[in-house]
Structures are given as structure tokens and as C-alpha cells.
Image (spheres, rainbow, N blue to C red):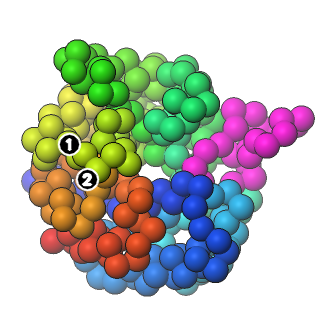
Amino acid sequence: MLMRTKLIAGNWKMNGTQAQVQAWARAAAELSGQDGGVEVAIFPSHVHLSLCRQAATGSPLIVGAQDLSLHRSGAYTGEVGGEMLVDLQLSHVLVGHSERRSYHHETDAVVAAKTARALECGLTPVVCVGETLAERDADATEAVLSRQLEAVLDQVGSEGIARCVLAYEPVWAIGTGRTATPEQAQAAHRHLRDIVTRRSAIVASLLRILYGGSVKGSNAQSLFAQADVDGGLVGGASLDPVEFATIVGAARG
């Protein structure tokens, strides 16, 4: 049976002082260095990236950014280019998080283009997809996931998606305390893998798909036990080092 290495990623969003972030990053670095065959990643705010890279020195902790610009460089105030992230020695970047899609009106086309931009820079995009509550209630979950993922596949192909990580984040479960059941998560992840399988069965079998939607210590084990759930994209719970360690421990089994 094929084993994909589980990945537990903490998305710190717009949180933390320098002192707090340094403490969180050191705790995450220590976690990442423990045995157990699980990769650990953190995605701090742009202003804390250098601090976290420094804290991760000498550990296998992955440090990534929460977004990148479509543009290489130039007069784009407030934007951060992919080459800038590479210059900071980062390896991963979130693309298409639901908060970017919702608050910044990023379309499927923009998410696909940002994925391509990240790959062009040599970064690993963590591509986020997921449905709203209204879409789930309308029984449109599979249609929405298909539309979002196909847009990326059409842009970068199976060769490109092979260099990505996917994250399924049901929008209705982010920061709400509601969580998809393990069975709901598995069904969505299976659907995503099936979409990629139609392009390349080998790529699909190797592709890691994370679950992101109010992951916490109390539900992590049941979620990670699902065949197509390869880890978690953790929000609020990743700001608590003890809770985050519990989640990583659940992935280690």
C-alpha cells in the first residue's frame, strides 16, 4: 500500500507579536525534529517570515508564506513576489485560501495563475479549495471542487499539480467550530483525487491532500485515519503549541 508522508501545516493568519511568533516557531521547530514520519509546516504573516526562518534553523520545519503576487516585481504596493519568498529561503506558499477568495475576490483563474507563478519560482503551492455552506446545502460540493481544481489543472497540468499540495477547506467549517465528519472529509478528498486520476493515476496516488476546517486535537485522529486525508491545514489551533503538538501527535499515530 502506498504511504504518503503526512503534513501538518499551521496557518497563523494575521496573528502574533514578534515575541509570540518566535515562541510558536521554536515550539514548531522542536516538534518537526521529533521522530514519527510527519512533516510540520508553519505559515506566518509576511512580516514574521524572516523571524520564523531563523527560528527554524537546524530543524526540518517548513516555513511558508500565506500568499504571493501574480507579478514578478514593480509598482504593486503591498504585494509580495515569489522571488522575494525564495530569497528568504522559503519553500511553500498558500494559494487560494478561502479568505483570499472571499475577502480579496480571488477567482479560480487568479488562483490558477498564482499556482503557476509559485511553480515558476520553484515554490510548492498549497492550493486550497472548498465549498460554502450554501453550496453544500445545494448538493453542489463536488461541482464546486471540480471547477476549482480543474481550473488549476488546466493551467499547470498534471506535471504541475504533482509539485503541489492540495488542501480541502470546507468554508462553512473554518473558524466556526463546525467540522466536516471524517466521512464527509474522506468523500471530498476522494473526489479531488479522482479528478487528478483522470489526468494521471500516478500523480494522483502521490498527491497529498490536507483537510482544513476547524482541525483540533479532539478530532484530528479520526480525520487523519481516512484513506485520502494526508494531514491538516490547521488554523486557530496552531496558535496553541500544546494543541498543535496534539494534532501532530495524532498524525504520527
How far from the left and from the top, in percent, is residue 188?
A: 21, 33
Kind of residue indicated by mark 2: Asp
* Callout 1 amino acid: Ala
Is 52 situated left or right of 3 in this image?
A: right
| Residue 161 found in image quarter | top left
Residue 53 in sight here: no
- Compared to residue 150, the image places residue 235 above or below, namely below
Q: Is residue 145 left or right of residue 77?
A: left
Residue 233 sits above or below residue 36 on the image: above
Residue at the image point whose x is 21% and y is 29% from the top? 191
Who's the residue at 18% across and 65% down the image?
218
* Residue under the image location 30 percent in, 21 percent down: 134
Q: Nearer the viewer, residue 110 or 1?
A: 110
Using the image, tell me which numbered label, if any, was put on residue 230: 2
Specify the segment rendered in magenta.
65-85
Q: Is residue 182 above or below residue 149?
A: below
State which mark lies toward you, 1 or 2.
1
Residue 130 marker: none
**In magenta segment, residue 69:** yes
Q: Which residue is mark 1?
A: 180
Q: Residues within 10 Å of mark 2 (few under 14, many from 20)?
A: many
Residue 31 point in image, percent of width and height: 38, 80
Total tally of numbered discs in the picture: 2
Q: Residue 28: image x %, image y %?
A: 45, 76
Q: Secondary structure at mark 2?
A: loop
Question: Does label 1 or label 2 sit earlier along the sequence?
Answer: 1
Q: Is residue 196 above or below residue 1?
A: above
Q: Locate the C terminus and report the quarter of the image it occupies.
A: bottom left
Q: Residue at x 65, y 43 (%)?
A: 68
The x and y percentages for residue 158 are 39, 30
